[in-house]
Image (cartoon, rainbow, N blue to C red):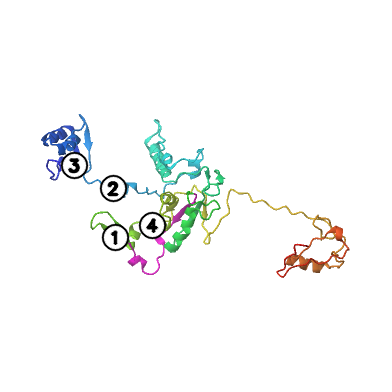
Amino acid sequence: APVGSRARGSTWDRGLVRADQGEMLASKIAPRAGLWHLQQALRPAAGAVVFSTPSSRSFGRHPKHDPRIIPADKPLPSVKDLTEALIKTPKRKEWLRQPFPYKKDDSKDERRDKRDVYLYQRTLPAPVVSTVLHGCHTKLHGDATIRRWWFIDAQGQVPGKLAAKIVKVIMGKHKPIYDRSQNLGDFVVVTNAEKVAFTGKKREQKVYRYHTGWPGGLVTTPLETMYEKKPEEVLRRAIAGMLPKNTLRRERLKLLRIFAGEKHPHSAEDLTPLPDNIVKVASPWLIVKERESVEVQTDNWWVDENGAPWPELVDNHGKKWTVEEAEDIIKTGNVVFRDPELFGKDVAEPRTDTQGGKWKKD
């Protein structure tokens, strides 16, 4: 330990060590080989002021790394407006290292508004402008990788069942371009998280646990306590526990927007209510093609394989058919196209084997 007083109010407890004080403490240490590194560490540059926090830690989860709480009263710009100028898909570090959009002539209020938009943009996952699906190697462009916005009212819903439905959406399993190695899911906005319904005795018995890493560092938080302080955290943890435990989980959770009350700042987005039985949704970028039906304007509607109308309802064996009998045959699917060359001739039925297949000789 460094030589010096550790009493309350000393320079070490205040976290402020001046250059002359560091030089003095370094001179008090005996110049032995084992303390040479400590002696050099206590010799700061001339005139420098070193700030240190005695109680700081450099391991594990830190509160400063938590996602920023977005105020529900202040509206935010749409994601499409923020990302429409991108030409290629940025990497995660490139997306997070964007410079502040400040100007010299901006006022204090304008800088505050730009800072809020900048911090909101950092909470979004990196947009996918173009990508190639794993396996089939299908190349997708911006129209195909668009992320839709879904809306859910969590009032009266069970958190577990609701989380299972949301996981499919933020993973992208409801889209035809689903790829487990990429983040291609949609955004989900959940409101009224403070009004969810718990089944059984989960509210009184369920407990969240985590360990600090130190002996005796097991921290337990009852569900009721967390629900009263952070109701949106209950649903977020349920969804996070159902996601695959890989590097994409943090990025997929950025697609989730949970709010305790009814208000949310995403009014600029085109929100669509999430259906209850969502399995697959139609792609919004595909144009449905209508089938062109070719109508043959003839009195005799029964035609051969070339489209030429038959003069009368007579098969190859010379048997005459009525319109009702022909319609019944067509409904059952047993339709044999007429061969004009064999019309009126008696043709033997093809021989079949025991399984109903046609003989090779025939």
Residue 115, image x, y percentages: 39, 40
**What residue sits right under mark 1 in the picture?**
220
Tag 2: residue type?
Phe
Please report the bounds of the magenta region as a residue range. Answer: 184-207
Does label 3 or label 2 sit earlier along the sequence? 3
Q: Nearer the viewer, mark 3 or mark 2?
A: 2
Q: Secondary structure at mark 3?
A: helix
Residue 64, image x, y percentages: 32, 46
Q: Residue at x 25, y 56 (%)?
A: 217
Q: Quadrant of residue 15?
A: top left
Tag 3: residue type?
Arg
Tag 4: residue type?
Arg
**What residue sits right under mark 4 in the picture?**
237
In this view of the protein, which residue sits in the foreground, 84 or 267? 84
Is there a contact, CB below 8 Å, between mark 3 and mark 4? no
Few, some or many residues within 10 Å of mark 4 (<14, 14–19, 20+):
few
Is there a contact, CB below 8 Å, between mark 1 and mark 3? no
Count the labels in the image. 4
Q: Quadrant of the N terminus?
A: top left
**What residue sits right under mark 3 in the picture?**
14
Q: Secondary structure at mark 2?
A: loop
Q: Is residue 180 magenta?
A: no
Q: Nearer the viewer, mark 1 or mark 3?
A: 1
In this view of the protein, which residue sits in the foreground, 288 or 304? 304
**What residue sits right under mark 2 in the picture?**
59
Q: Is residue 303 left or right of residue 4?
A: right
